Image (spheres, grey):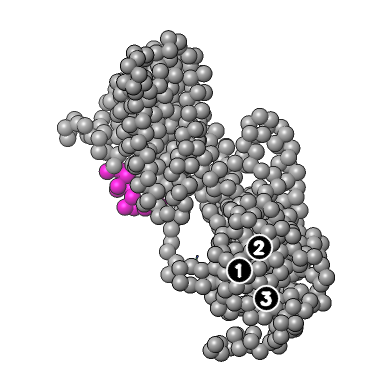
Amino acid sequence: MHEQLLFALEVSLNGLMTGVLYSLVALGFVLIFKASGVFNYAQGVMALFAALTLVGFQSGQVPFAHLINAVFGSNIHHFGWHLPVILSILLTLLVMVLLAVVIEKLVLKHLINQEPIVLFMATIGLAYFLEGFGDLMWGSEIKRLDVGIPQGISESIENFTFESLGYGFFIDRLDIVATAVAAVLVISLTVFSQYSRVGRALRAVADDHQAALSVGISLRYIWVVVWSVAGFVALVAGIMWGAKSGVQFSLSLIALKALPVLMLGGFTSIPGAIIGGLIIGVGEKLFEFLMGPLIGGATENWFAYVLALVFLVFRPQGLFGERIIERV
Amino acid sequence: MTEEAMDKPSDGVGCGAAVLMDIRNVSLRFGGVKALRDVSFDIREGEIRAIIGPNGAGKSSMLNVINGFYHPQEGEIWFRGKRRPPMKPHTIARHGIARTFQNIALFRGMSTLDNIMTGRITRMGLGLLSHAIWWGWAEREEVQHRERVERIIDFLEIQPIRKTPVGRLPYGLQKRVELGRALAAEPTLLLLDEPMAGMNVEEKEDLSRFILDVNDEFGTTIALIEHDMGVVMDLSDRVVVMDYGRKIADGSPQEVRNNQDVIDAYLGVPH
Ligand SMILES: Nc1ncnc2c1ncn2[C@@H]1O[C@H](COP(=O)(O)OP(=O)(O)OP(=O)(O)O)[C@@H](O)[C@H]1O
Ligand SMILES: [Mg+2]
C-alpha cells in the first residue's frame, strides 16, 4: 500500500512536469488572446516551426534546399558548419520576430474590426501555411533536437528517494530542466506584463482598444510585440517538446493539449493557464494510473477534454476568469 | 439668428485668442445615415467650447472626427494653423489631443494609478529598447512620470483609490479617473464627451470645479459635450448647437439660449 502511494506520487510528479509544458503552450494562446482577441490556432505550428528553424540553424542546413536544388539542378543541403546553441536560438528568435511583423503586415492589419471568427479562420489559414512553409524551408523528415539539455533518469534523485523513502523515483532530467525553464519564463512574463511599460500598454490594449488608441498606443505595434512574445514562448515550448520527442509534425499537436488547459484556466488568465496546465498534467497521469487498467488504457487521449468539459459546465468563466453577469 | 450674430465672439476666456482648431465643412456618413452635415466651427486657444444638441445630433461623432476615430468623407480639420492630413487616433493623441468617452472607457483590470500612468504614454513612449538596454535610465524616467501622475491624483482628490482596480469604483469616481488619464497626457486640446452624465448634483459641482481649474491653471483648451444646460452656462465660453448632424447655432451661452432654432430643436418642433 505504502509502495502504491509512493508510486502515485511519482506519477503525479511526472504529470506536474508535463503539465508545466502544457501551461507554456497555453500561455502563448492567452497572451495573444488577451491583447488582440484572436484565438491563435497557429500557436502549435509556431512551436513546430520554431523548433525546425532552430535545428536548421544549428546543423547548418541550407534553407529551401529542396526548392533551390529543384530549380538550379544543384545538390546543396548543408553549409558545412555547426552553429553554437546560443547563436542558433538568437537567430531563431529573430526569425520569430520577423514572422510576427509579417503576420501583422499581411494578415492582422487587414482584419482590424472584423468578427473574431474571421480572425480565427485567418489563423487556421496561417497554421497550414506555416506548416507547409516550414516543410519547404527545412524539409519534412524527423529531426533530433539537441541543445545540450541533460537527458535520462536522474540517478541522484533515484538514489536519494530510495534511501530516504525506500522507493526510487524515476524522474527524467529533461523534465526537471523543462520545468525550471518554464517556471522562469512564466515568472518573467508575469513581471514583464505587470511592471514594464510595454506590459502596461499590453494590458491596456487587452482591456479596451478604443481607450488604448486614445492614449496614444498603436495597436499594430502592440500586436507585433505580442506575436513576437508568443513566438518566443513557442520557441521555448518547441525546444522542450522537441528535445523530448524529436522535431516532427506531431509537435504541432501539443496545441491540442493546450485547449483543455484553456477551457480550465480561462482564455484570458495567465495564472489560469499555469494552474490549468498543472491540473491537466497531473490529472491525466493519475487517472491513467488509477483507472487505465480498469477501462483499457489510453485514457490520456481524452481525459483532459472530459475534465475540462465537466469543469466548463460548472465554471464557464474558467478558474480565474471574471464572472460575466449579463446586464438586463 | 443672423450669420453676424453667430460669428460674434463672446466675452469669455477664448475671446480674441488664436484659433487652435478649425473645423471646415465636415460631413460624415455611415451608409445612409448622415451623422454630420457640412459642419464648421472653430475652437480657440484656452477656451471651453461646449457642444450641445438633442440625442443623435452628431456631437459624439464630431469628437470622434477630431480625435481620428472617424474619418469624414468631406471637409477639413485645421490644427494649430495647419491642415491636418488623415491620421490614426494614436498619432493624433501624440499631437496633444486627449479625450474621455461617453461610455466610460477605462482599463478595467488596472488600478487607478496604472490607468492614469497609461495617459503618459504620449509623453514617455513605450521604451521597449531603452528598457532592454539600460534599465536604470528607464527607471529614473519612470519615477519622474510617476510624480506627475501623483500630482494629478492629488489634484483630482482621488488618493484613497490609487491602488483600487477601477472596475470596482463607483461610476462618478470612474469618470474622474478617466479625466485623470486624459490630463496625464498634458493635452493641448481636451475632449470631454458628457463628463457629467449620470452624476448627482454634488458630483457635478466637483467635476465642474476640476474642469474650470484645468482650464485656468494649465490653460488647457477644452471641447465639452454636455446635456445639463446649467453646467454648460456655467462652464463654457462659447457653445455650438447641433441638431440632425447640422450646426444650428454658435455663440455665447446667452446667445444660444435665446435662439429660436435652439429652442425649437430642444422642444422637438418638426423641420
Ligand atoms: N459608428 C457608427 N456607425 C453607424 N452609425 C453611427 C455611428 N456612430 C454614430 N452613428 C450615427 O450617427 C448619428 C449621430 O450619433 P452621435 O453618437 O454622434 O450622436 P450624439 O449627438 O452624440 O448623441 P447622444 O446625445 O445620444 O450621445 C446617430 O444617428 C448615430 O446612430
Ligand atoms: Mg454622444
**Rendered location of residue B244, percent (x, y):** 55, 78
Q: Which residue position is annotated with label 3?
A: B240
The amino acid sitting under disc 1 is: Val
Task: Answer whether labels 2 and 3 touch (C-beta < 8 Å).
Answer: no
**Rendered location of residue A114, percent (x, y):** 42, 54
Callout 2: residue from which chain? B
Q: Which residue position is annotated with label 2?
A: B77
Q: Residue at x 52, y 18 (%)?
A: A87
Precedes in sequence: disc 1 or disc 2? 1
Q: Secondary structure at mark 2?
A: strand
The amino acid sitting under disc 3 is: Val
Q: Residue at x 25, y 38 (%)?
A: A302
Q: Which residues are magenta?
A: A306-317
Using the image, determine if residue A296 lies above or below residue B177: above
Q: Residue furthest front?
A: A72
Discs 1 and 2 share one subunit: yes
Q: Secondary structure at mark 3?
A: strand
Task: Answer whether labels 1 and 2 touch (C-beta < 8 Å).
Answer: yes
Q: Which residue position is annotated with label 1?
A: B26
Using the image, determine if residue A69 lies above or below residue B152: above
Q: Is mark 3 within 8 Å of ligand 1?
A: no
Q: Observer-nearest residue: A272 or B221? A: B221
